[in-house]
Amino acid sequence: MINKTSSERQKSSTLSWATSWAFALIVAGAYASIPRQSLATPVQTQSTPVVSTVTPTPVEATPPSCVKLQLAQLEKQQVQRSTPQGDSRPGGDVLAQNPPQNPPKDRGAPAPGQRTGGATRGRCPSASKPLTALVPIISASSDKSQHPVLASTPTGSVLGLTVVSHPTFWFYVPYSITSERPVEFILKDDRDNIIYQTLLSESATAPGVVGFKLPNTVKPLEVNKRYNWFLTIACTPPSSISSDQQEPVKIFVSGWVERVTLDPSLQRELDKATPQQQALLYAKGGIWYEAVTNLAELRRQKPNDVTLKAEWAKLLRSINLEAIASEPITSMLTPKK
């Protein structure tokens, strides 16, 4: 009885050992089928021991959970290596390879200009006050909260905003405008293409502030687009140009205008306001060209009105041109025919 039990135990031990060995071979075979990172080292063929005394119980050839995990990790690494680098968010690769077709326009681009007259060559006759464009220069102390465009415009830009398609430009001219001293106005787009160019009408009036309205025949200014304007005065008469001179000596001023949409709340206030109040509302909203035009037109109608004089001086003082406030508003210029 004791011998029989010992024999059965020996057979059971042998069977257990053989089963474990067979299972190890299956696992080894599954692991051997996993692709290696390097192919430089060949796979060694292992010899399979022969077990003749025991027939093991059939085992399904399915990799255990640890092998499944290794396979999944290896597959993920291969996919990551074959994927182009880019945004890790859904659709990120498309975003990285195909940027937006219409990126937001940079409204922080500089708008350089020259508010007071400078000569292209030589000098023009001396004057107590220079040729001056009545337009703001954006400075660090400017109230940029009036309009978002002004808030994003760099310091030093000679820029004013308008809400109309054909604004009026204002200048202080220290000379009488005659045939011997022609004046020219030029308007360019933001790519330096000339949109409009004309000689302005002659006037024998005394020095003072003059206005020029962009004619309705000119293509309307586009909203959210900047335009560069120039006003030049030829100080040397054409008849006085020598043979070695190709152009007359000129002084000029330049700046920028940008058309923006009128805020609905400001529009409602304007609808209820008087012309004088409208000028103040435009100034408060950062719409310079309409502010100065409204007030200048009122001053032309009532040149001796004390209240209008005070408002005019306050408006010009806000852009550091108080020296021009005492000058008369003489005329409106028109294109020369």
Image (spheres, helix red, strand yellow):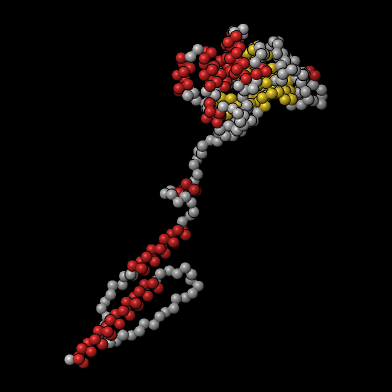
**Is residue 207 shown to the viewer in this render?**
yes
State which quadrant residue 114 falls in: top right
In the rendered view, does 42 fall on the left or right side of 242?
left
Judging depth in this view, the residue of 221 and 20 nearest the camera is 20
In the rendered image, which quarter contains the N terminus? Answer: bottom left
Residue 84, horizontal then vertical, whole percent: 48, 54
Report the label total.
0
Image coordinates for residue 16, horizontal then vertical, percent: 28, 81
Q: Residue 4's spot in the image, x, y percent?
A: 20, 90
The residue nearer to you, when weighing 323 against 217, is 323
The residue under the point 49% across, 48% down is: 96
Q: Residue at x 54, y 16 (%)?
A: 279
Residue 185 in view, yes or no: no
In the displayed structure, would residue 49 be above or below residue 239?
below
Quarter where residue 256 is shown: top right
Q: Is residue 334 above or below residue 34?
A: above
